[in-house]
Amino acid sequence: MPAQQHSRQRGPSFSRRDFLKGSGAAVAATAIVTAPQEIDAAQESGPKVTSAEPTEVTLTVNGRNYRLKVEPRVTLLEVLRNDLNLTGAKEVCETTTCGACTVLIDGKATYACARLAIECEGQDIRTIESLRNGDQVDEVIAGFVKHDATQCGFCTPGFVMATKAFLAKHPKATLEDVRKGLGGNICRCGTYKGITECALELARKGGA
Ligand code: FES
Ligand code: FES
């Protein structure tokens, strides 16, 4: 069940004009003729679309600015893992279903596979790597360890980030709140009991 706090935005759609531009050869081959005034009207009313060429973007990740050149189709998850070597967020379903790729964007739990990197310029992106400082780890990570809330670990970084965002918003969460609030993440190993116990213990202490 999708959690409310998760953002599931998809990338911008293409206007008719951009589609026609991108498939010019096919249009010519099939002799489809569109009146110029119709195309211009479509361009003015359609969404603004950037070029498909790599474009420069500055992403703020874990408090650090990264200047990158990325194609508009590239997701935030791909940039984090492939360009910035921040591999905590996991690539599992890529269909906004499992939550393994969850990061925080402006404090909100977000599926990184569902956001284009170019959309995230100017936003505060936090990954699981931000929750560790040398030997010190965030209390949510410590809580997962304490409550044995991990097995294979594939869902764990996403679950930790979702829990972090959830407790920041619901510092006195109840069992029902936790079940609903973390419903956007899936654990195939079935560690829900430990995750829930961790979240409830932190909620009893006033959040994370
Ligand atoms: S990999 Fe993003 S939701 Fe599953
Ligand atoms: S610990 Fe294996 S999927 Fe959650």
Image (cartoon, helix red, strand yellow):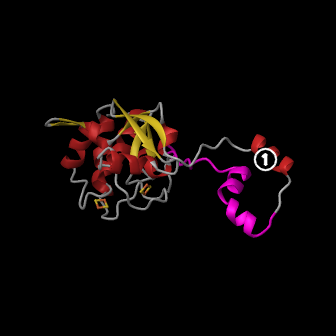
Q: Which residue position is annotated with label 1?
A: 42
Q: Is residue 34 above or below residue 135?
A: below
Is residue 22 a member of the stretch shown in magenta?
Answer: yes
Neighbour tally class for label 1: few under 14, some 14-19, many 20 plus, Cα within 10 Å: some
Residue 142 at what x, y percent from top left? 21, 42
In front of the other: 73 or 33: 33
Q: Amino acid at mark 1?
A: Ala
In front of the other: 54 or 80: 54
In front of the other: 144 or 153: 153
Residue projecting furthest to the left: 135
Question: Residue shown at 43%/62% (left/top)?
Answer: 93
Question: Residue shown at 43%/46% (left/top)?
Answer: 76
Q: Is residue 77 above or below residue 189?
A: above
Mark 1 within 8 Å of ligand 1, using the beta carbon: no
Q: Is any part of residue 175 visible from this angle? A: no
State which region is magenta: 4-32
Quarter holding ligand 2: bottom left
Q: Quadrant of residue 203?
A: top left
Label 1, secondary structure: give it: helix
Q: Quadrant of the C terminus?
A: top left
In front of the other: 56 or 10: 56
Question: Residue shown at 74%/64% (left/top)?
Answer: 28
